[in-house]
Image (spheres, rainbow, N blue to C red):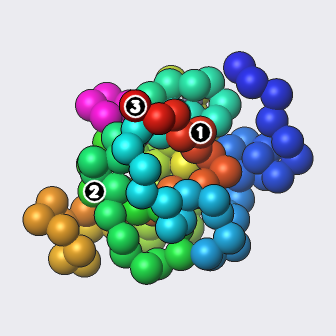
Amino acid sequence: MKRLSEEEKRILLYKGTEAPFSGKYNDFYAEGTYHCKQCDAKLYSSKDKFKSSCGWPSFDDEIEGAVKQIPDADGVRTEIVCANCNGHLGHIFKGEGFTAKNTRHCVNSLSLDFKKS
Ligand SMILES: [Zn+2]
């Protein structure tokens, strides 16, 4: 496990949300892999990232088995966490029609660590 900053802890451990359009990967499209900031597990490939203009990095698929979906405490949304360390990533939305997979993983940049391929 990595040492997390206070802001990273707020997101990953206490399920916070970074401000929209503030994250370093919001408008970022290099080729590579996004790892969990806390445990370094591979979570997303850049090929599944798309521009949603929602203010957070958006992916329409995860690396197989890397992301777990759980009902959010708000009773409405579905939360996504790292399957390895349970760190909070964001939320998953379906049926919005952004891509053919019709799925948007809305992920906090602070939960991710990008590595070039
Ligand atoms: Zn993790």
Would you say the beta carbon of the disc 1 residue lies within 8 angstroms of ligand 1? no
Asked if 41 appears above or below 29 in the picture, the reply is: above
Residue, disc 3: 117
Mark in the foreground, 1 or 3: 3
Q: Residues within 10 Å of mark 1 (few under 14, many from 20)?
A: some
**What secondary structure is the stretch in magenta mostly built from?**
loop
> Horizontal placement of 75 versus 60: left or right?
right
Quadrant containing the N terminus in the rendered view: top right
Q: Mark 1 sits on what residue?
A: 113
Residue lying at 68% horizontally and 70% vertically, measured from the top left: 22
Q: Which residue is mark 2?
A: 60
Q: Amino acid at mark 1?
A: Asp
Query: Where residue 30 appears, x then y in whole percent?
Result: 43, 50
Q: Residue at x 38, y 44 (%)?
A: 31
> How far apart are the two marked residues, 2 and 1, measured between alpha carbons?
18 Å
Q: Nearer the viewer, residue 93 or 76?
A: 93
Q: Is residue 77 visible?
A: yes
